[in-house]
Amino acid sequence: MPNANEDNPTALSQVQRRAVSELLRVSPVADDLARRFQDAGFGLALVGGSVRDALLGRLGNDLDFTTDARPEDVLKIVRPWADSVWDVGIAFGTVGAQKNGPVGDSVQRFQIEVTTYRSEAYDRTSRKPEVSYGDSIEEDLVRRDFTVNAMAVALPEKEFIDPHGGLEHLALRVLRTPGTPEESFSDDPLRMMRAARFAAQLDFEVAPEVVSAMKAMAGRIEIVSAERVRDELNKLLLSAHPRKGLALLVDTGLAAYVLPELPALRLESDEHHRHKDVYEHSLTVLDQAIALEEDGPDLVLRLAALLHDIGKPRTRRFEPDGRVSFHHHEVVGAKMTKKRMMALKYSNETVKDVSRLVELHLRFHGYGTGEWTDSAVRRYVRDAGPLLDRLHKLTRSDCTTRNKRKAGTLSRAYDGLEERIAQLKEQEELDAIRPDLNGNEIQEVLGIGPGPVIGKAYAFLLELRLENGPMERDAAVSALKEWWASQS
């Protein structure tokens, strides 16, 4: 691949060496497909994120290609070659495929997308972009979001195509647009969120003119569907540096449209009413929650960490003694979380889990120095349910005090709570707390059939179980009969 810029030869040569290595790894599959397009009279090029990631030394097995072939021709070429093909994106010019191919001494699975040269743009009212096909790769590249994604490698010749200085910008770790930012964001307003996402994913800086356009055009994001906004937000949150991307969304005004609860955390304070900066605190909690992750990025935990205090602005009260209170902000915040996530079209399960964590995040602070009874510990575990491990992480992350003594005290107290939970788990079935008699046994003891009273009896026994721990069957039967007698 030829050198695109001589100003920084060391950085660029390192980038290019990484790219050559990555491209050689995928060449057997990519070149095989390219020759099939060549034989059919069409061109094929690796493009966009695949080229960018190759230059960064992180190309995976998801490969993006562009071609002058129309979608129906792409299908004719790809179907006999691929192991499987799907055409759900064909209305937008994209054909997907899966192919197993050799990589060194192994065989790996490749996910492939081939898209016809195209441009897409929103009009002032539609939530869906209009797609039109182009005839040249240069026309395709100029309509892409950022210069680092507007590079291509023509195959099988390995000709590097970089008409907008993407290689130089990649070496400088900066995000710029091929044309003007205003044109790019007008074509697809979601690109403004993508700028924040790439800043977070790649730890790149966003060029000043791009930031200015984001500020001026932030309101245009409202034309984009909630699903696309949600997906972009998820990618940002699951990135290596989400704080960087979130701060950009807030600073440019985009967050005011897609996640208004976040900039609302920037509460004004004065010399008489001092309190922690809730916005900075929330970003710090997010950072600390990420540090506690054990099995890769956890979207539910990260959302809960970011949103756990969004109820504070609505519950802030200035007390007569000069303190500031946020009574019941966890309950208000849980409702706000549910409403916002539903507006962003999150799944019911994700909404339920995140809002529940927000609701429970303060529960530990009633633990003090260990005064909770075993019953209270059981209820803590029961209420958290399968979210207990995440609740542990969220609660620990919520300690952002700079007072080392206070931080140490909170940490030791939570250590103590976790130890008590572990001890009770050894003695009882804490992970699935249920009454000592099931529904059939309750009917047998009471001599009645199914009906509402069985549910009431079950709730009574569950409460007894939480309060006292496991009971012998005879004791449970006796307690149930005593309860039943009191109902008549």
Image (cartoon, rainbow, N blue to C red):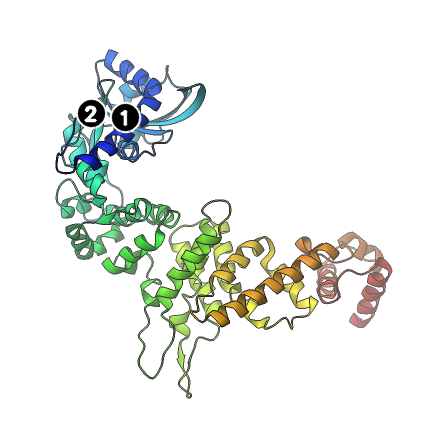
Lateral position of residue 213 relative to residue 350, left or right: left
Q: Which of marks 1 and 2 is nearer the N terminus?
A: 2
- Type of residue at label 1? Val
> Is the C-beta separation of discs 1 and 2 under 8 Å?
yes
Drawn side of residue 73 relative to residue 316, left or right: left
| Residue position for label 2 | 1
C-alpha separation, residue under disc 1 versus residue under disc 2: 8 Å
Q: Is mark 2 on a helix, strand or loop?
A: loop
Residue 250, given in percent of the width and then of the height, sits at: 28, 59
List the single residue furthest toward the front: 10
Residue type at mark 2 is: Met
Q: Residue at x 65, y 70 (%)?
A: 372
Residue 206 position in % (x across, y down): 22, 49
- Name the residue rendered at 17%, 38% in the picture: 168
Query: Residue 345 or 112: which is nearer the viewer?
Result: 112
Indicate the position of residue 218 as horizontal and vertical percent values: 22, 55
> What residue is at 40 percent from the left and 50 percent from the top?
345
The residue drawn where x is 45% and y is 58% is 304
Q: Nearer the viewer, residue 266 or 343?
A: 266
Q: Residues within 10 Å of mark 2 (few under 14, many from 20)?
A: few
Where is residue 148, by image quadrant?
Answer: top left
Query: In the current view of this chain or complex, which residue is farthest to the top?
Result: 39
Residue 20 tag number: 1
